Image: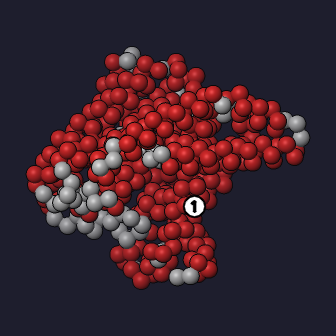
Amino acid sequence: MSPFEISVRFFLQLAVVLLVCRLVSALARRAGQPPVVGEMIAGVVLGPSLFGLVFPAAQAWIFPQSSRAVLLPVAQLGLALYMFTVGLEFRVDMVKSRWRAATAVSISGIAAPFVLGCLVAVGLVQAGGFFGASVSLGAAMPYLGAAMAITAFPMLARIISERKLTGTPEGTLALAAGAIDDAAAWGVLAVVLAGLSGDVSKAGWAIGGGLAFVVVLKLAKPLLARVGRHWERSADDRGASLGSVLVLLMLSAWFTDWIGLYAVFGAFFFGMAMPRGPFVDHVRALIEPLTTKLLLPLFFIYSGLNTRFDLLTSGWLWMVALAVFVAAVLGKAGACYAAARLSGESHRVALGVGALMNARGLMELIIINIGLERGIITPALFSIMVFMAIATTLMATPLFNRVQKLRE
């Protein structure tokens, strides 16, 4: 397809995506799931697992392979903008007041599933057919451990926002621990990829660059406060201030992507660094509606186009899928619950945190897509991990709703 044909097809794709997302989200809402879960399912519906299976010619015409070069950057833009608004709403004061619990939950939420993932990797390497032929046990173990330890950070943030949990103990605790968990998981992934490439310096660059980025944001707070004060002068200054923030946001997302971390972390931490006040409220009110209704659904669809459930064709593979699912739930939800309780949180809050942290969502799909593209895992293991990601995400909201009915 020519660039002109791809651009024309993009608008049709956008219309189809928005329509299907609205329909599936409405059904999800009736089933007690948040709209974000419906959008995740809509991505799978429009992908090869359903639409491509029933109407392969139509699916290939609407979503040709060549058009994904346009879908990906627009999807990344939507995700970065949304995570920026989540960062704007993030209450650092709540994290500080619960820092001990957040640290304990994040460490437990990383360590337990990581260890279980390493143990599962040992069995899968011995069984054969789940990892690439050139992937050693030393590379397979940390990769699967990181994949099991990941949290659906963007989805977790959106569930917390949609359920009005941003300022609650369980919402703040889960969001803080989820951010730390995913940053650590991406750091491990960087080490694994560096090991496969034979260049360990790439991992050091990713981790060191991320830490330096956080320090720079902290030092830049006076400059960001000055941008907010400039916004209050006139209508023209308001437009200039918003433009300055968007430039800094794009640079933040670019930098964290460039050093080997994911763009969402640059966007989220930049949002956190913005001084609170009328300017931040204005920016969020402008960006959030268009992002959630127009751009963010493309991220779900792009991930769904790479998802295939038709690869799970034998009882043995479903047994492996069940074992991975059980290990994921016990390692994440169980460990986070125990850590929260030991940190002094109530039984209800600890259960709520465990239920929210257990969701993997599209961050899981991202990390396993990287593994598939790099030849670390085979399509069979990829499909198993997709099943685990969707199952743990679907169970998050019903479990959390049930927990909320418990007494302290």
The answer to whether one can see residue 163 in this image is: no
Q: Which of these two is toward me, 284 or 257? A: 257
The picture quadrant where one finds residue 15 is bottom right
Judge left or right: residue 221 versus residue 67: right
Q: Which of these two is toward me, 395 or 67? A: 67
Residue at horizontal 37%, vertical 18%?
Answer: 343
The picture quadrant where one finds residue 93 is top right
What is the residue that sits farthest to the top in this orientation?
344
Q: Which of these two is toward me, 221 or 27? A: 221
Judge left or right: residue 15 versus residue 131: right
- Residue 323 place in picture, x, y as percent: 19, 47
Q: Is residue 296 above or below residue 308?
A: above
- Residue 356 place in picture, x, y as percent: 41, 38
Judge left or right: residue 166 versus residue 290: left
Q: Is residue 291 above or below residue 346?
A: below
Give the residue type that dot 1 points to.
Answer: Val
Q: Is residue 217 above or below residue 191?
A: above
At label 1, counting other C-alpha atoms closer than 10 Å, the crowd grade (few under 14, some 14-19, many 20 or more) is: some
Disc 1, SS: helix
- Residue 395 place in picture, x, y as percent: 36, 45
Residue at horizontal 24%, vertical 61%?
Answer: 378
The answer to whether one can see residue 281 in this image is: yes
- Residue 280 place in picture, x, y as percent: 71, 37
Number of callouts: 1
Residue where numbered disc 1 is placed: 74
Residue at horizontal 10%, vertical 51%?
Answer: 126
Residue at horizontal 45%, vertical 35%?
Answer: 208
